[in-house]
Image (cartoon, rainbow, N blue to C red):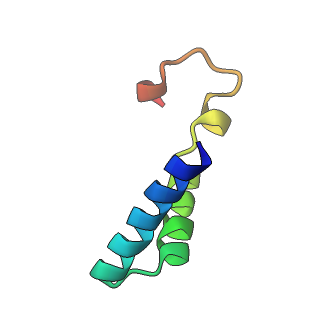
Amino acid sequence: MRDELADVLTYCILLADRIGADPAEIVLAKLARSRDKDLVEKARGRNARYDAL
């Protein structure tokens, strides 16, 4: 499993380098966007479907 993960990470780092992106920066930006979409707090105590929130 570790070898497979290393392969995927290597590919991701090489791709980030190719497009001129900083891997740490794009991961943090994605986490921030995901946090903004986090439905847990919106859904807590409600029975509405996630797409209605």
Q: Is residue 19 left or right of residue 9?
A: left
Residue sitting farthest toward the bottom: 20
Q: In front: 26, or 45?
A: 26
Residue 13 location, quadrant: bottom left
Please give the name of the residue rendered at 57% of the width and 43% of the height, measured from the top-left corner: 38
Q: In this view, does 43 lie to the left or right of 18?
A: right
Q: Position of residue 4 (x, y in %)?
A: 50, 48
Residue sitting farthest toward the top: 47
Q: Quadrant of the N terminus?
A: top right
Q: In front: 8, or 30?
A: 8
Please give the name of the residue rendered at 52% of the width and 18% of the height, measured from the top-left corner: 48
Q: Where is residue 9 in the image (x, y as percent from the top left)?
A: 49, 61
Q: In front: 5, or 27?
A: 5
Vertical comparison of 38 with 43: above or below: below
Residue sitting farthest toward the front: 3
Please give the name of the residue rendered at 71% of the width and 22% of the height, measured from the top-left corner: 45
Q: In front: 15, or 33?
A: 15
Please give the name of the residue rendered at 29% of the width and 80% of the height, measured from the top-left corner: 18
Q: How many labels does the image show?
A: 0
Residue sitting farthest toward the left: 19
Vertical comparison of 49 with 6: above or below: above
Vertical comparison of 45 with 34: above or below: above
Residue 28 location, quadrant: bottom right
Q: Position of residue 34 (x, y in %)?
A: 52, 52
